[in-house]
Image (cartoon, helix red, strand yellow):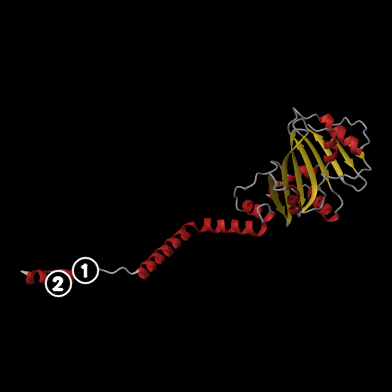
Amino acid sequence: MTILNSHISVITLARTSKYSVSFDPGLFTLILALVSIFLLVILLVFLRKRVILLLSIWYYSLVYGQFSYEFLNFFRNNNLRSPINGCIKDEISTHLLVFYKKIKNSQDFQTNTDIDYGKIPFMINSKTLFKSKGKPDCMKVISINDIRFIVAGYHETLQGIRMRSLYFFVNDLFVMGEFLFSDLLRMKPATLVATLSAKYLNGIPVESEVFYIKDTHGNQINYEHNGFSISIKYLYKGDQTTNMVLSAFLESGELSENDLMTMGNDELLDRF
């Protein structure tokens, strides 16, 4: 009986040895790698456009920055929703055009005081602006004939009243600023006009809802109260190259979006 049990044990061990397979970690790793590569290839085939798009966004963000013309223009050229809200809904040319085709029934004034846009000097580039004021709350970029236009905006308050401060760049040079007031229920237009007059016009009365002020260097201010909002624009005219660029487009009417795809009056005086 003992001999018989021994034979059975030998046969059982033999069968177990015959049908068992030892685990090979190297082979398992190779199979896993091949499956992963296969799945990756399938993923790239079906999602290659999206992958390329994401890699491009990462590249433009890394190389140029998320507030650069190149980064935002990539979204515009690829019909993607911009990651930053647009500053203005109308055409950029509309804001610039008032200095090249004057508004009817407007008044003109001369000043001996140099026109500036608060504490931000004209002709700086956008990176310098962002270092000074921080990340913008909104941006818009367009281009035509290799000329780049950027609008960067900030939500601010003046005497407790909300407004937007807009910075217009032509080929990355700051040439026009604009204060835009939309809350007319709280804003008193007469206060703004009186402050501008005090700084630039020796306090003479100004009753027009649209007027221009020009300094001895040719820089200009445009004040406009259209019944819905108040806009005060400041245009720098000291750079001949920029003047030629804007004149060529604005005077011919070619620059369009289709083509381009509580504090006192000291705060007012300091800002204006």
SS under mark 2: helix
Residue 52 coordinates in the image, percent (x, y): 55, 59
Asked if residue 257 is positioned above or below residue 64 in the image, the reply reads above
Q: Residue at x 48, y 60 (%)?
A: 44
Q: Which residue is mark 1?
A: 19
Residue 255 coordinates in the image, percent (x, y): 75, 48
Residue 20 coordinates in the image, percent (x, y): 24, 68
The furthest residue to the top: 185
Would residue 7 appear left or right of 148 to someone viewing this image?
Answer: left
Q: Residue at x 41, y 66 (%)?
A: 33
Decide if residue 44 is in sight here: yes
Q: Residue at x 87, y 52 (%)?
A: 238
Q: CA distance from mark 1 to mark 2?
A: 14 Å
Residue 158 coordinates in the image, percent (x, y): 77, 35
Quadrant of residue 91 in the image?
A: top right
Locate the N terminus and report the quarter of the image it occupies.
bottom left
Quadrant of residue 178 in the image?
A: top right
Number of other residues with Cα within 10 Å of mark 2, as a class: few under 14, some 14 to 19, many 20 or more: few
Q: Which residue is mark 2?
A: 10
Q: Which badge, 1 or 2, comes first in the chain's sequence?
A: 2
From the viewer's side, name the closer residue of 3 and 179. Answer: 3
Decide if residue 145 is in sight here: no
Residue type, label 2:
Val
